[in-house]
Image: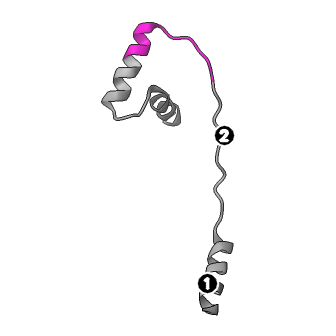
Amino acid sequence: MKDNKKDAVAFLKNISRKEVERKRSVTFSITESQLKKMDTAARKNGFKNRSEFLASIIDAI
């Protein structure tokens, strides 16, 4: 039992926390047709929403 506790403590000490990047809300203007294209492309490519789709495009830059 003591060995299990030691193993658990050692495991917890070795966990390194990944820094989570904070999300920020941004506002910009695009046309209705651009918005429709983005919605269509997001759905077609399996994204949950256009924000997720746009974020993946930005990450690819």
Position of 39 with respect to 7 (left or right) is left
Upstream in sequence: badge 2 or badge 1 = 1
Compared to 16, does 27 lie above or below? Answer: above
Q: Which residue is mark 2?
A: 22
As shown in the figure, which amino acid type bears the numbered disc 1? Asp
Name the residue tied to disc 1: 7
Quarter residue 16 falls in: bottom right
Residue name at image x 41 percent, y 33 percent: 48
Q: Give the image location of residue 2, x and y in percent.
A: 64, 92
For this view, does 24 lie left or right of residue 49? Answer: right
30 versus 50 height, above or below: above
For mark 1, give the secondary structure.
Answer: helix
- Residue found at x 31% / y 29%: 44
Image quadrant in which you'd find residue 7 = bottom right
Establish if 6 lies above or below 52: below
Q: Position of residue 61 (x, y in %)?
A: 51, 33
Question: How many residues crowd mark 1 within 10 Å: few (<14), some (14–19), many (20+)?
Answer: few
Q: Amino acid at mark 2?
A: Arg
Boundaries of the magenta span: 26-36
Residue 6 belongs to magenta span = no
- Quarter of the figure with the N terminus: bottom right
> How has the structure been colored for display?
one colour
Classify residue 4 by image quadrant.
bottom right
The residue at the point 62 percent across, 80 percent down is 8
Near mark 2 (Cα within 10 A), the count class, few <14, some 14-19 or many ≥20, is few
